Amino acid sequence: MERHILVVLPHPDDESFGISGTLAKHIQSGTPVTYACLTLGQMGRNMGNPIFANRETLPYIRKRELEESCRIIGIQDLRLMGLHDKTIEFEDKDKMTKLIGDLITELNPSLIITFYPGYSVHPDHDATGAAVIRTVQKLPKDKRPTVHCIAFSQGCEQEIGAPDVFNDVREFVDKKMGSIQAHRSQWQLKTILGGKSPQSKEVQERFGKERFWTYRFD
Amino acid sequence: MELIKPEVVQRVLDLMKEQDLYIHLEMTNGAYAAHLDKSKIAAATFIRNGVIRYSHGSIAGKGPYRVGLKLEHGWVYSEGLTHYDETETERLILAGHDNDGKLLVSLQLSREPF
């Protein structure tokens, strides 16, 4: 069992598809989870369908959606870190290292979950992962928490190999569906399921597995 | 957001001319454009809270609409605008959305920073 899990991701809804089942599973077994969400996804281009948000209302709406998603997953400690969407890679590197270093010092996590730098498609994802790796790398080897990374760029397995952590989260697919549905400005669950029931075998198979790469430090 | 009523937008543009304004201007095809289709490039640009002043501004087209603002030394131009926020009283919030509701372009003006 993990002592404490720290999740560091840049956008509300980054927690939904890839890791909500894993988090719900850990939470059920009693592990405390802190989710540091770096931005409010205020530059997202999905505004609901039909449209119910605009550039100025979006951050407020996405904050509420994120809170609902966390409630459904069971995350007790959500931290909104106040950065601006699309700008993580341009933030001062020392500031980012301090921001993440302070969280590690405070929470003493045994596991951090973030994006795999360079293999996570969105520049904010890559920059978030890079900041976490940079920060953990600076810790003495015996003080480093394990880091599990999410990667999904095309052909990433050819470069970083296959994932080494597979979590069976079929029991928690309903929570994952709830988390996705909470982000209603960004996703329409009906479209994602393509008319299939959340209880159907296909949906259980597709959403019931989560995979991670354990980051190998030098 | 509602479909643009050009006469309403024109009235606001007239009210906002000849004063310092904060502008939010952006265009994007989505951060995942290249991930989803290798032949594409993810392209996006935004400027937030730049300060401009225009001597005259107008909306043109039959929908989607275009807006041009004439500055002392240049122009602000935006094409593909479809929606406006009808609830705003002090600011102009314009956006262009595709058929799935995704934002393609936005042009916003305000006397206070966004």
Image (cartoon, rainbow, N blue to C red):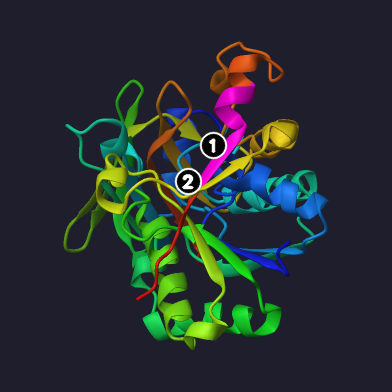
Q: Can residue A190 be seen here? A: no
- Location of the C terminus of chain A by quadrant is bottom left
Which of the 4 image quarters holds residue A194?
top right
Residue beneath disc 2: A44
- C-alpha span from label 1 to label 2: 8 Å
Q: Which residues are magenta?
A: A204-211
Left or right relative to A203: residue A175: right
Residue beneath disc 1: A47
- Location of the N terminus of chain A by quadrant is bottom right
Q: Nearer the viewer, residue A91 or A52?
A: A91
Q: Amino acid at mark 1?
A: Met
Identify the residue shown where x is 42% and y is 56%: A125
Q: Can residue A201 be seen here? A: yes
Q: Is residue A207 above or below residue A19?
A: above
Judged from the image, the secondary structure of the residue bearing numbered disc 1 is: loop
Q: Residue B39: x and y, percent?
A: 17, 32
